[in-house]
């Protein structure tokens, strides 16, 4: 790993540089570069199969990118290269994600699912947990209280003790979002937060995303197909197609961009 | 709900209280058999069942909570039995030292075996651990095919461990492990295990290292199995490895069966499952003259029970129990609703 180029601008949280990944002969992400600033809602858009989720997976190290670098300003202010790190270490840096098809644990309650988001912050040893020493008990109690605050913030406190398997889709999406809030995140990645939601729920989501950013003082990076939501909520948008960079700019700029229009609607004439 | 523990009903819902009560009942059975109220062979069979229940708790954590299927239980039981033999019989050291040595060896072996085998999942893991278990069994058999612990050499803190005393030791260890395991299940560790069983990607995204928690579950199951072996040797005091089924695949499969029948995510269910597989035949069926004449039918009855449970209650005995309590609650709620309706009518 190179340590020479670990520099981010003062207001940058994440910088993706020349990111590429090949699956066999297919270039799913091709030389992609962009950067996300502090307290910014950043959108990644593109037609189906453009490589948006693959890009997320490369950033969070679920996939190993073929080339490129992902610089991230961690919780304690250091700049780190994420490429090559363990998947389960990413959340410790302050980068946390949701999944396109809602990865909750059906056998656990809503409360316990959200508590998983604080997993890396539990400090008591296995021994203390096994014997239920006061330290472990106190820690668990504290995190349960914090979880309850998060659940109230997301408006799902009533479901705290129900199992996740039987919940409506909209609630499950909120639970998954709540799970990202316990770890003191600096950047939250939402993979299609509006997919499967009705119009009312989508409006509520728009509000929630801005609220999360303000309350937790973090940046948000999202992939979304619902253009209404993207245009409403994002400060900046990056558009890609077939893994390649198309354009980056404010929502208004992206709407006017010829290349983006062609990618979505097909070339004219 | 730890806030309102005042009412007696809530105290009974407290796991440590339940476990202690259960332990007292188990001890009472032995006391009654000492006084001749219950036959001593019945109490002996119960102690034997409890030994398998100890192993099953570990397996419950491994299969039910972590989603890992191992068929290596038997080999690790062997470690415990042989540790007892070499420490206590050959060298005359007390049980306490055998206990420490068993703990140490099984921890070390669990880490090594786990580190090798946990890179693969599902049925392949089962086959690999089965192979390793057979290796352990054959090595032990080559070292000494028959081991026997003489009563004179079996002491703990100066007390001679005849099978009545050993029974109480088994109950204590069983209750202790039940308590520790139920704590773990409700701790961040338990949550991490269930998370990794259900969704490896969500678990990893939340910072759960799959290898770490798989290894942890595997090592815990290994230690419990080895402790089971230790208790077996102290209780039964002899083992002919070449002819006994204890260290063979049969035991591993029986424990797997016990955990599934009980409901793989229930510690109490695990006991019931063990009881069905080991307890019913040795404590009840073997007393009925018909089964004494035709021992093959005993296995058949257990087999039928397993088929019935798996077919109609895939969640195991624990599911039956929760179904019953749910229907009671429903009836209660319906009753309360009817009473409220009536009240409204009167007004």
Image: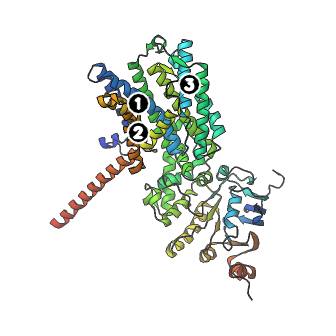
Q: Residue furthest front?
A: B294
Q: Quadrant of residue A30?
A: bottom right
Label 2 SS: helix
Q: Is residue B244 visible?
A: yes
Please, is residue B192 above or below residue B38 in the view? below
* Residue B74 falls left or right of residue B329: right
Separation of marks 3 and 2 at Cα, in angstroms: 26 Å
Please, is residue A180 above or below residue A239 in the view? above
Q: Quadrant of residue A248?
A: bottom right
Q: Where is residue B70 shown, x and y percent of the image? A: 56, 39
Label 3 SS: helix
* Residue B146 falls left or right of residue B325: right
Q: Where is residue B113 shown, x and y percent of the image? A: 63, 35
Please, is residue B206 above or below residue A224 in the view? above
Q: Is residue A133 visible?
A: no
Label 1 SS: helix
Separation of marks 1 and 2 at Cα, in angstroms: 10 Å
Q: Residue furthest bottom?
A: A269
Label 2: which residue? B273
Label 1: which residue? B49
Q: Which mark is residue A116?
A: none
The residue closer to the viewer here, B177 or B271, is: B271
Picture quarter with the C terminus of chain A:
bottom right
Label 3: which residue? B102
Which callout, 3 or 2, points to the residue nearer the camera?
A: 2
Query: First in sequence: mark 3 or mark 1?
Result: 1
């Amino acid at each position: 790993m190179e340590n020479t180029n670990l520099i981010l601008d003062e207001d940058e949280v994440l910088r993706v540089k020349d990111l590429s990944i090949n699956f066999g002969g297919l270039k799913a992400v091709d030389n992609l570069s962009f950067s996300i600033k502090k307290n910014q809602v950043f959108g990644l858009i593109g037609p189906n199969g453009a490589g948006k989720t693959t890009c997320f997976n490369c950033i969070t190290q679920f996939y190993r990118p073929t080339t490129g670098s992902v610089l991230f300003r961690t919780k304690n202010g250091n700049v780190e290269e994420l490429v090559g790190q363990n998947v389960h270490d990413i959340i410790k840096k302050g980068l946390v994600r949701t999944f396109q098809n809602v990865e909750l644990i059906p056998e656990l309650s809503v409360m316990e699912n959200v508590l998983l988001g604080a997993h890396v912050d539990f400090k008591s040893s296995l021994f203390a947990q096994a014997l239920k020493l006061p330290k472990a008990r106190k820690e668990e109690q504290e995190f349960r209280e914090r979880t309850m605050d998060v659940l109230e913030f997301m408006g799902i406190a009533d479901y705290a003790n129900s199992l996740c398997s039987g919940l409506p889709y909209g609630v499950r999406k909120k639970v998954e979002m709540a799970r990202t809030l316990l770890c003191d995140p600096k950047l939250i990645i939402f993979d299609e937060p509006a997919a499967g939601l009705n119009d009312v729920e989508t409006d509520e989501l728009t509000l929630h995303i801005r609220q999360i950013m303000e309350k937790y003082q973090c940046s948000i990076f999202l992939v979304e197909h619902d253009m209404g939501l993207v245009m409403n909520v994002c400060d900046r948008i990056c558009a890609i197609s077939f893994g390649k960079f198309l354009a980056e700019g404010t929502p208004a700029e992206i709407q006017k961009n010829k290349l983006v229009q062609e990618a979505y609607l097909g070339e004219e004439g | 709900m730890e806030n309102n523990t005042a009412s007696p009903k809530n105290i009974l819902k407290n796991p440590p209280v339940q476990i202690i009560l259960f332990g007292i009942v188990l001890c009472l059975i032995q006391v009654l058999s000492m006084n001749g109220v219950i036959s001593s062979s019945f109490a002996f069979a119960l102690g034997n069942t409890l030994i398998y229940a100890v192993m099953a708790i570990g397996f419950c954590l491994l299969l039910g909570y972590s989603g890992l299927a191992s068929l290596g239980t038997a080999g690790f039981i062997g470690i415990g039995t042989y540790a007892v033999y070499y420490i206590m019989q050959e060298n005359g050291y007390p049980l306490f030292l055998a206990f420490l040595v068993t703990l140490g060896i099984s921890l070390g072996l669990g880490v090594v075996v786990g580190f090798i085998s946990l890179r693969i999942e599902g049925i392949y893991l089962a086959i690999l651990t089965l192979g390793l278990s057979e290796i352990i069994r054959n090595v032990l058999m080559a070292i000494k095919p028959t081991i026997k612990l003489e009563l004179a050499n079996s002491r703990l803190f100066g007390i001679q461990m005849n099978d009545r005393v050993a029974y109480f030791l088994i109950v204590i260890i069983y209750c202790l492990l039940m308590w520790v395991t139920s704590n773990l299940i409700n701790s961040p560790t338990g949550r991490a295990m269930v998370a990794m069983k259900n969704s490896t990607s969500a678990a990893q995204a939340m910072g759960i290292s799959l290898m770490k928690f798989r290894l942890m579950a595997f090592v815990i199951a290994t230690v419990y199995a080895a402790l089971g072996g230790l208790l077996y040797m102290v209780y039964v005091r002899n083992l002919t490895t070449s002819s006994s089924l204890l260290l063979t695949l049969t035991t591993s499969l029986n424990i797997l069966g016990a955990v599934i029948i009980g409901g793989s995510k229930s510690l109490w269910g695990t006991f019931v499952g063990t009881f069905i597989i080991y307890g019913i035949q040795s404590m009840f069926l073997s007393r009925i003259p018909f089964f004494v004449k035709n021992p093959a039918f005993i296995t058949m009855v257990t087999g039928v029970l397993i088929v019935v449970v798996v077919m109609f209650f895939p969640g195991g005995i624990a599911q039956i129990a929760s179904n019953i309590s749910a229907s009671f609650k429903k009836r209660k709620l319906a009753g309360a609703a009817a009473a409220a309706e009536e009240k409204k009518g009167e007004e």
